[in-house]
Amino acid sequence: MSNYNYDSRSVCAECFSDEGIKNFIEGAAESNECSFCGMVSNEPIAARFKSVATHINDSLYQEYDDAANCMSYVSAEGGYLGETWPTYELLVDVIALELPRDEDDSLFNALVHRLDDNAWCQRNPYSLTYAQETEFGWKHFCHVVKHQRRYFFRDGDQRDSEILSPGELLETILNYALRIGLIVGIKRGALKVVRARPQREGEKFEAALDLGPPPLEKATQSNRMSPAGVVMFYGSDQVQTALRETAQTLGSGTYALGEFFNAREIVILDLANLPGIPSLFQEIPDSMEYNPRPVLQFLHHVSWEISQPVERDGREHIEYVPSQVVTEFVRSSSGEAGRIDGIRYPSAVPPGLASYVLFADQDNVAVPDDKRPSVRGDDRWLELVARSERQVTTEDLRLAGRNGQTCD
């Protein structure tokens, strides 16, 4: 038998780190023994190597191609006009395929032998990749809204056809969020949002209107999701997050904490609970009408960008503009997504924590025995259910990093 005649062999999921390949093998397993790492089980754990290699090969063509199909070749210039890779370099340097049990390189050599022997190149090599389109589209959007205009976007604007216009980028955020299921309805009383307010000497915030969104005359700062003059409610998913987002130094007094629930069903755009980006080798079910990989690459990039901390050095009025424009677009949504009441986004402090911006001002805060005239059809859906006080501790600030938002 030839050293490279592996078609009769089987390979198990544990020989790969990539989740897409592991899932394929688990779904196609028919052998109780892995020919490469030697693992044996009472149940099928390994799929035919030939089938696995074919799946990897076919998957590569989603984002890569044979340079002979799409690149210019000029002998005088030394070959193809563009970057190419032999199969082994594509797997090692570009894909970074990990084979945790392949101590003798037998699996790697088998793959190199079994995959197409191409001069591999990027699919559509003379165009931007999808990741580049997303990155450059966001940079273009930021440049326009920071330095050119931020209120009106016309589709007829002349632009690079490979890069989304500002208006298209905003539409894409909501369209993709709908596809992935990030427009989420929350039943009455199911949302808990904590807001922290520093209390200066002699101050004591106890009432819902004190602990909730600020009055119009106090909305004088530019915040992550709202410009000066526009009131929104900022909060976090837990007390520790709220303190880390608000406190900057020890010994800065007592913090009043207000815990609010939603007094009616609301709808939020949840950018803090994004599914992971699928592997290039993840099978796409026939029932799925789109490829989730580029969709989630785009949404992860947008979520990361709008959550980045910004120093309050005077430039925050400019640096916050992109996230403010996205927020205003979401708030004004009236299409398929319907009305959206807020955004959940990753906190600017350690990963895994979340913050909220809710599209509510003081007219939306429920107050006991309220005698205030209603200006929104009695839509008072933000209700204070608990109040407490805390001194800021070293632990509260330990992972805080830079302040990501200000709660006026």
Image (cartoon, rainbow, N blue to C red):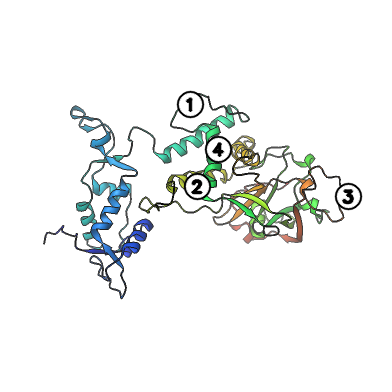
Mark 4 element type: helix
Secondary structure, mark 2, is helix
Residue ID for mark 1: 159
* Image x and y of residue 126, in percent: 34, 32
Q: What is the CA distance from the residue labelled 3 to the residue labelled 2?
A: 44 Å
The label nearer to you, 3 versus 2, is 3
Q: Which mark is residue 300?
A: 2
Amino acid identity at mark 3: Lys
- The residue singled out by tag 3 in the image is 371
Who comes first in sequence, dot 1 or dot 3? Answer: 1
Report x, y in % for residue 177: 54, 46
Residue at image x 86%, y 45%? 373
For the residues labelled 4 and 2, the Cα–Cα distance comes to 16 Å
Question: In the rendered structure, which disc, 1 or 2, sits on the residue that comes first in sequence?
Answer: 1
Q: Is residue 262 left or right of residue 280?
A: right
Report the residue that reaches farthest toward the left.
Answer: 1
At label 2, counting other C-alpha atoms closer than 10 Å, the crowd grade (few under 14, some 14-19, many 20 or more) is: some
Q: Amino acid at mark 2?
A: His
Label number found at residue 171 = 4
* C-alpha gap between disc 1 and disc 2: 24 Å
Mark 3 vs 2, N-terminal side: 2
